[in-house]
Amino acid sequence: VSRRYTKYCLWIVTAIALVSLVIINVLDKRQVVDYVMISVIYSLVTCFLNGASWTYVAKSSSNSLGKFYIVASSLRLLLAIVVVLVFCILANNREKILSFIVVFSPFYFAMLVFESVFYSRVERRRKRKI
């Protein structure tokens, strides 16, 4: 399950990054390419951490997986808030901050939706086996 999760995450992050880069190229907004890279790094780090921690929790105490899903989503949200706040502190321009949020949001929400759908299917399959 962890490998599938990580593989799908990589596909989704790559697809969003490519679409973002095409849009940036069409709109000639090359100054926001760095924002895409920050968003990709955030998405990949949370993806790998989530996949690895899911494996650990599933092996050690599979009864706690419900709590894990809540904690993982909460930590993803807190990390996203920290990333945005750090960017706000470092950026000295409101336009840059808004541009970053516009670029960062699709990555965050796509991974949030993916994670919800993926883990609900995993749980459904797991309950069928029981």
Image (cartoon, grey):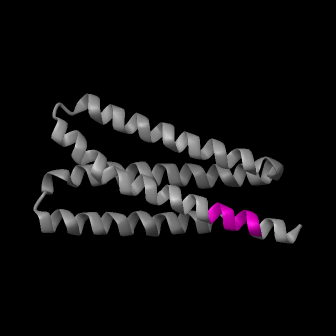
The x and y percentages for residue 100 are 26, 46
Point out the image quarter for the N terminus: bottom right
Residue 121, given in percent of the width and then of the height, sits at 68, 68
Left or right for 85, reference 100: right
Point out residue 17 in the picture as x, y percentages from the top left corner.
32, 63
Tell me the magenta residue range: 118-124
Residue 89 seen:
yes
- Give whichever of 49, 87 is nearer the camera: 87
The answer to whether residue 2 is visible is: no
How many numbered circles does the render carry?
0
Horizontal arrangement in the rendering, residue 123 relative to residue 51 (left or right): right
Q: Quadrant of the C terminus?
A: bottom right
In the image, farthest residue toward the left: 28
Q: Residue at x 34, y 50 (%)?
A: 104
- Is 120 within the magenta? yes
Q: Quadrant of residue 5?
A: bottom right
Q: Residue furthest right?
A: 130
Taking the spot 13% from the left edge, 57% from the top edge, the residue there is 29
Q: Residue, x 43% and y 41% (percent of image)?
A: 80
Quarter assignment of residue 127 = bottom right
Q: For residue 17: magenta?
A: no
Q: Please tell me in which quadrant of the rendered image residue 96 appears.
A: top left
The majority secondary structure of the magenta stretch comes to helix
Residue 82 appears at what percent x and percent y?
Answer: 41, 34
Q: Residue furthest top?
A: 89
Residue at image position (13%, 64%) is 27
Near-viewer residue (2 or 100): 100
Is 18 above or below relative to 65?
Answer: below
